[in-house]
Amino acid sequence: MGALLAGCATNEAGQIESDLVGTINGAGSSAQSAAQDVWISDFQQNNSRVTVNYEPSGSGAGREQFIAGGVAFAGSDAALSDDELASGEFARCVDGTQGINVPVYVSPLVLIFNVEGVETLRLDAAAIAGIFSNTITRWNDPALVALNEGVSLPDAAITAVHRSDDSGTTKNFTDYLYANEPEVWGNEAADGFPFDGEAAQGNAGIVNAVADGVNAIGYVDASRAGDLAVAQLKVGDEFVTYSADAAAAILDESPLVTRSNPNDIVVAVDRTSTASGVYPLVLVSYLIACQQYDDADEAELVRSYAEWVVSPEGQALAAEEAGSAPLSDEFSATVIAAVESIS
């Protein structure tokens, strides 16, 4: 953040005044919410005349608001699609230019559960796909019993809770299920959940529904799991517990999607990896910005904020406070270069 603080002075409240002045608004991913809170707090502490607002309205809503010009940047657990890029309707961007995706937040997705008498739960992709597609409907289903030797699973109906809103978290979750169990799941990855069942708004809604529910299970960003029990995931021949390190490991093994703009960075997560030490049910969440803004002052604010978010210090802060996986040194260099290209 050295460049941001050049010529700065500390005011009476202990905040640092920089040359940056203004307000930028963002919206989108609720998974990013905890990280955005700490990024914004620290950034404003070091740039006392800047205000950054972020509304965790969901990835789909965030992308829509950004494209329509309602916000200066978006957070999204799904990258801008080819159709969105081809629309040419990025209201705050210079005519003829597009938005770019910059990975800023990497986190495991976890299966939280609240099942009477059950403290440990082991699941594989087929079981998860069956539960959320409503083909496995009771906790003592033979498929679940076989995965959970020594665990007394109740003869009780499963309440599987999914997102009611268009969600990048859902897209990452369904991408994992379709990649591993296409015949069981039967639907390609999408922001909208494809099956009926109990639904809740945002990560917070799913957490509340599972916590207050009976024999319930749901999928959320790991930072939102709180005190709820979390299932172990079968990877290869092992059942693994999620961790930031395991999430980072799968990112480093995954290729980038080919895009026409080298500053548009989209990760094709290897969902089917069985390598030791990886956790493939992971969310890669993006900061979406204009490559070129109509307003040069807004461009400077967005670029400066994004530079802080992807800096080693910003990534370490999110890891400490939100449980995310910091970008690796090699990957970080690519991301920082993309952010610096915003103008």
Image (cartoon, rainbow, N blue to C red):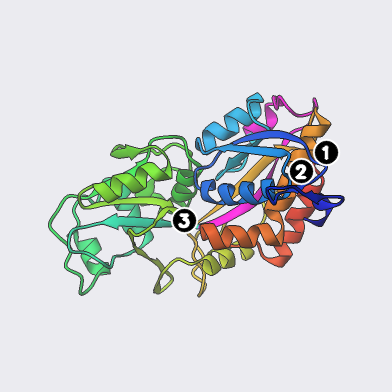
Q: CA distance from mark 1 to mark 2?
A: 7 Å
Which residue is labeled 2 in the image? 303
Verify CB contact (< 8 Å) between mark 1 and mark 2. Answer: yes
Q: Position of residue 84 (x, y in %)?
A: 64, 31
> Which sits in the foreground, 218 or 229?
229
Residue 33: in sight, yes or no?
yes
Identity of the amino acid at label 1?
Ser
Q: How many numbered markers are drawn?
A: 3
Which residue is labeled 3 in the image? 223
Residue 264: in sight, yes or no?
no
Which residue is labeled 1 in the image? 343
> Which label sits on residue 105?
none
Which of pointers 3 and 2 lies earlier in the amino acid sequence?
3
Q: CA distance from mark 3 to mark 1?
A: 32 Å
Q: Residue at x 71, y 39 (%)?
A: 50
Left or right? Give the position of 205 relative to 89: left
**The residue positioned farthest toward the left in the image shown:** 155
> Which sits in the foreground, 60 or 55?
55
